[in-house]
Image (cartoon, rainbow, N blue to C red):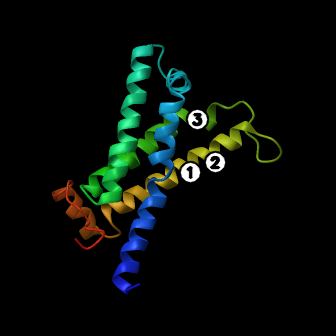
Amino acid sequence: MSLTGLSILMAFGARLLLVLLFFPFSAMDKVLNFRAAVAQAGETTSNQGVAKALIFAGLSVEIFMSLGVLTGIADRFAAFILAGYCIVTALLWKQFWRQPDFSLRGKSAGREVFWDFLKNLAVAGGFLMLAFGTDAASISQFIHAPFSSTHPYGF
């Protein structure tokens, strides 16, 4: 395999690892366990219609933004949306501060939720790095052309 081929494979592999949680797994879970997903969304709203709309919105984000990141089509914008999605889901469904048993030792549901909260934020950081790059010039590029592609595969 050539160095170019290996580079493309590694770029795709890194992007795949970043979105794998959402596409296909979380998206598929929402489809296969739709009622449970709506019940979880119902924790933030008492309106069933709103809960279903949240699930459909999340499903759309997980599928279409993940495909954007994988294909490189408007990948910076897609990564930005996925970062926001990770932060919002952390704040809505990973509320470790509401757990009655947060403890640093022994069994603790609060600590488990805390780790999930931090994982969501870490994944958001990965998406923000993809969206903004690693320097001020890259951030400026995103601000001026948020729907641009990073051309991850050299096309």
> Residue 103 versus residue 7: which sits nearer the camera?
7
Task: Name which residue type carries label 1.
Answer: Lys
User: Is residue 115 shown above or below 97?
Assistant: below
101 to the left or right of 142? right
Quote the CA–CA distance across marks 1 and 2. 6 Å
User: Is residue 111 shown above or below 125?
Assistant: above
Residue 115: assigned label: 2
101 to the left or right of 126? right
Q: Earlier in the sequence, mark 2 or mark 3?
A: 3
Q: Earlier in the sequence, mark 3 or mark 1?
A: 3
Task: Name which residue type carries label 3.
Answer: Gln
Q: Position of residue 146 (x, y in %)?
A: 21, 54
Indicate which label's residue lies in the foreground, 3 or 1.
1
- Residue 102 position by quadrant: top right
Q: Position of residue 116 (x, y in %)?
A: 60, 45
Q: Position of residue 42 (x, y in %)?
A: 51, 20
Question: Disc 1 designates what residue?
Answer: 119
Residue at 35% over, 53% down: 79
C-beta proximity under 8 Å, tags 1 and 2: yes
Residue at 38% over, 57% down: 128
Q: Quadrant of the N terminus?
A: bottom left
Task: Name which residue type carries label 2.
Answer: Trp
- Specify the farthest residue to the left: 144
C-beta proximity under 8 Å, tags 3 and 1: no
Question: Disc 3 designates what residue?
Answer: 95
- Specify the farthest residue to the front: 1
Residue 2: assigned label: none
Answer few, some or many: residues within 10 Å of disc 2's Cα (few below 14, many 20 plus, some between 14 and 19): few
106 to the left or right of 146? right
Q: Secondary structure at mark 3?
A: loop
